[in-house]
Image (tube, helix red, strand yellow):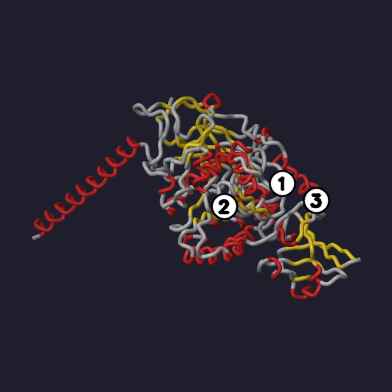
């Protein structure tokens, strides 16, 4: 009896083993097929995070420069050395950060950006960085062209900077300060404003202008004039109580990028696969790409070659011609509301389509091309919006959900929702609040206006520029868009420009116009003639 049971057990073990081997062989065979087709190669799992949580950063000490990550002493090397890579193959590098004195960093939280480039062919592609929270990072690339390439690393934002920003958000609400004008002839007074609600004991000292700000919290210090005399907004100097070290840290965000690009870099070689020298996308046109796929964060989603952006998500079938763009926009308005970086899209379209612009900085405008029957609209989003020294009237700002709610049921317009740069001066929770409010209006518009085309434009990356406007927050904002719009992924197109602008860095928040034209065409290829 025991021998019989033992035989049955042996047979079961053998059958299970055969099944496991069969499954593994099937997975292996499918992997070979994917490799042959060169489409969306599966990325090996990498353990690490794209960024550290706020609480981890708040535990940081604010150190002097010598103890911070240093580009001259930090190192990069291949995780698995090999003389060359095949087209489509994954490339992994390790980055170890050291301070100025050559001491190894033992904590994470520094924001690194990595890219691979070949200046001779004007080729470049971004890599993903994963933080192991011990001073080491993994960079992951995909070989997207055959030939030579150089891998570079940039220390974009240090842990100490992020810790300071979070503390300042808590204490001061924002890094810059907004002001309001209150006017009632012959009197005129000014006061500072904030999106943070004052404490209950001090409520009577503040004007609650939430209703006037389309339902988003906005409070301005009371003056001798009544709150209903608010007329204009502008941005002025901010006086923070900071020590010498903290003041120094705030200057890092405006320093040139060159000194923070690692002195060490990697040269690699990439082989053709068959007759293919460039990685190609799946066989689907961009205007037929399901909206849900555009929200799937696969990196890289494209690369530059000969100064042209090549999508890895879909085939770009939209001709880069004036006639193709005009046919797409005919009988429609393209709504590009947001900030000056969305106004850049409008500027690029005016340049390409050769119709006059009446833009005046942050003044709302709808420009029409009556001959070809289309319009392009720009409007500054709701406060917080830091206008600069110029004083803008209240009507200059409008929430994007208001714009959507006013569109008729018969609209065929293209609406691109966009919030980004101005929110980087405050806590990410403020950004989430504004994104969340867009969702019900978007759902309502899609339900009642079946011919509307709706998109969300994600954040873009850049080196540095204006003080404290750092693109690190774009990593967090991208996740917020994905989380808050989760129920609409199958109905709204996500315009992901992160990889594009990581691959071809811009000096500051305003991308070079040659890059903006590439971004605009990617937008048009996804949104024009969608079915």
Q: Nearer the viewer, mark 1 or mark 2?
A: 2
Q: Which residue is mark 2?
A: 334
Q: Nearer the viewer, mark 3 or mark 2?
A: 2
Q: Residues within 10 Å of mark 2 (few under 14, many from 20)?
A: some
Q: Residue reaching furthest front?
A: 371
Dot 2: element: strand
- Mark closest to the chain's N terminus, 3 or 2: 3
Q: At 51% across and 67% down in the image, what residue appears?
A: 444
Q: Nearer the viewer, mark 1 or mark 3?
A: 3
Mark number displayed over residue 243:
3
Q: Are marks 1 and 2 in contact (CB under 8 Å)?
A: no
Q: Which residue is mark 1?
A: 63
| Residue 28 drawn above or below residue 118 | below
- Mark closest to the chain's N terminus, 1 or 3: 1
Left or right of 57, for residue 32: left
Q: Are marks 3 and 2 in contact (CB under 8 Å)?
A: no
Q: Percent from the top left, x then y, of residue 182?
A: 83, 65
Q: CA distance from mark 1 to mark 2?
A: 48 Å
Q: Percent from the top left, x then y, of residue 489?
A: 46, 57
The image quadrant of residue 43 is top left
- Mark closest to the chain's N terminus, 1 or 2: 1
Dot 3: element: loop
Q: Residues within 10 Å of mark 1 (few under 14, many from 20)?
A: some
Q: Quadrant of the N terminus?
A: bottom left
């Amino acid at each position: 009896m025991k021998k019989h049971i033992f035989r049955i057990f042996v047979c079961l073990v053998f059958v299970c083993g055969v099944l496991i081997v069969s499954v593994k062989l099937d997975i292996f065979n499918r992997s070979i097929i994917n490799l042959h087709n060169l489409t969306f190669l599966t990325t090996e799992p990498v353990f690490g995070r794209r960024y550290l949580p706020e609480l981890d950063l708040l535990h940081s000490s604010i150190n002097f420069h010598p103890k911070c990550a240093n580009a001259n002493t930090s190192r990069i090397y291949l995780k698995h050395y090999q003389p060359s890579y095949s087209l489509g193959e994954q490339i992994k590098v390790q980055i170890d950060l050291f301070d100025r004195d050559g001491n190894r960093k033992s904590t994470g939280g520094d924001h690194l950006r990595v890219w691979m480039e070949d200046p001779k062919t004007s080729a470049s592609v971004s890599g993903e960085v994963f933080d192991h929270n011990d001073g080491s990072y993994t960079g992951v690339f995909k070989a997207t062209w055959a030939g030579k390439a150089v891998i570079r690393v940039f220390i974009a934002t240090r842990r100490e900077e992020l810790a300071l920003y979070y503390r300042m958000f808590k204490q001061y609400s924002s890094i810059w300060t907004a002001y309001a004008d209150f006017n009632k002839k012959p009197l005129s007074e000014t006061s500072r404003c904030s999106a943070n609600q004052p404490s209950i004991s001090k409520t009577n000292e503040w004007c609650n202008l939430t209703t006037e700000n389309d339902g988003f919290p906005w409070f301005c210090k009371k003056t001798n004039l009544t709150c209903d005399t608010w007329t204009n907004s502008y941005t002025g100097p901010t006086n923070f109580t900071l020590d010498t070290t903290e003041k120094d840290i705030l200057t890092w965000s405006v320093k040139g990028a060159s000194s923070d690009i690692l002195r060490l870099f990697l040269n690699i070689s990439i082989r053709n696969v068959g007759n293919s020298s460039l990685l190609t996308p799946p066989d689907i046109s961009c205007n037929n790409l399901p909206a849900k796929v555009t929200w799937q964060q696969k990196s890289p989603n494209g690369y530059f070659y000969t100064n042209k952006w090549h999508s890895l998500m879909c085939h770009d079938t939209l001709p880069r011609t004036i006639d193709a763009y005009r046919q797409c926009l005919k009988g429609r308005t393209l709504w590009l509301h947001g900030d000056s970086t969305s106004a850049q899209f409008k500027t690029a379209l005016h340049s390409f389509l050769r119709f006059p612009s009446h833009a005046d900085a942050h003044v709302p405008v709808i420009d029409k091309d009556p001959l070809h029957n289309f319009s392009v609209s720009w409007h500054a989003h709701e406060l917080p919006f830091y206008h600069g020294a110029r004083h803008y009237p209240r009507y200059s700002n409008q929430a994007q959900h208001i714009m959507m709610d006013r569109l008729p049921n018969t609209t065929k317009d293209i609406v691109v929702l966009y919030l980004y740069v101005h929110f980087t001066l405050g806590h990410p929770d403020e950004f989430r609040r504004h994104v969340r409010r867009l969702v019900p209006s978007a759902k309502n518009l899609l339900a009642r206006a079946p011919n509307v085309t709706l998109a969300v434009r994600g954040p873009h990356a850049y080196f540095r520029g204006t003080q404290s406007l750092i693109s690190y927050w774009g990593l967090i904002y991208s996740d917020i868009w994905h989380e808050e719009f989760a129920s609409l992924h199958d109905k709204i197109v996500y315009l992901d420009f992160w990889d594009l602008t990581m691959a071809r860095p811009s000096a500051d928040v305003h991308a070079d116009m040659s890059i903006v034209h590439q971004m605009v065409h990617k937008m048009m290829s996804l949104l024009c003639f969608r079915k």
